[in-house]
Each structure stands twice: as C-alpha cells, then as structure tokens.
Amino acid sequence: MNAMQNISRRLFLSQSSAAAVSGLAASTTIAQPVVTDPLIDAIAAYRSGLADFNQNAPEDDMGSNAYGEITWKPAHAVLASWTRPAISREGALEALRIAHWELDYSGDSAMIVPMMAAALSYFEKEDRT
C-alpha cells in the first residue's frame, strides 16, 4: 500500500484547503511601489562607463577615442541632453555631485547645466509642497 492510500480524502482536502488559504493571505500583502529615478540610473551608467574606460582603454589616442565612444560617451550624451527634473531627493543630490565632479575634472562640460537644472527643479518643487 502506498502513502497516498493512507490519507483519507477528507484529510487531504482539509490540508490542501488550509494551505491554499494561507497562501492567499500571504499574497494579499500590498507591496509599496518602488520608485526609481531615471536620473540616478543615467548617472550610474556614466560612472560605470568611465570606470570601464579608465581600467580598459587602449593607450593610443585612436584606440582610446574609439573605446570612449562605446563606454562613457553615450551616457555623457544622455546627461548632457537631460531636460527632466530629478524625481527624488537622491537623484537631485547625485545630479549635483556629478555636476560638481565634472566642473572639478574638466572645468567645462555640457552636462553641468542640465544636471544643475534637474536638481534645482526638484528642490524648487519640493519647496512648494
């Protein structure tokens, strides 16, 4: 006689129903929405591209320029053309940090003004609420 034959239909149904109900109760917990700021992601992509470039770029100018085109330059272009406000305090702070770093590093970068504007827009909106 196998193990299934030792379990009555009533016992099986009561245990499986209890398991189903407890699973239902656990799944009704309302999850809080996760808000991600696309600006944080864009800045992270830029930093990642820079790190890759600094670690792996060829020594020659031609190779270095070509490697920059596939590592940090695409993300830099995204940040330089950014027109939206940060949607989180952390995003606004990251925008200010990267603008400050760019100012120290290059003295002039196409991304400084858009990053400052994204941060300022966030803080002005926060100030109105």
Image: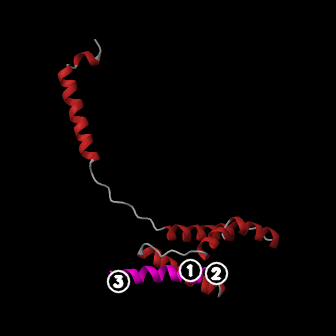
Q: Which residues are magenta?
A: 109-129
Residue identifier under label 1: 114
Residue found at the very far top of the displayed protein: 1
Relative image position of residue 88 (x, y in whole percent): 42, 73
Location of mark 3 (residue): 128
Mark 2 or 3: in front is: 3
What residue is pinned by disc 2?
Answer: 110
Estimate the spatial distance between the alpha carbons at disc 2 and disc 3, rounded to whole Å: 29 Å
Identified by mark 2, the residue type is Ala
Residue 60 seen by the camera:
no
Placement of 51 over or under 24, stated as above or below: below
Q: Are marks 2 and 3 in contact (CB under 8 Å)?
A: no
| Residues tagged 2 and 1 counted as in contact (Cβ below 8 A) | yes
> Which x, y percent locates residue 94?
49, 76
Q: Is residue 84 left or right of residue 15?
A: right
x 43%, y 72%: residue:
87
The residue under the point 71% across, 69% down is 68
- Which element carries disc 2, helix, strand or loop? loop
Using the numbered discs, state the Cα–Cα distance from disc 3 to disc 1 in whole angstroms: 21 Å
Q: Is residue 41 visible?
A: yes
**Front one among 1 and 124:** 124
Quarter of the rendering containing residue 102? bottom right
Q: Residues within 10 Å of mark 2 (few under 14, many from 20)?
A: some
Q: Is residue 7 magenta?
A: no
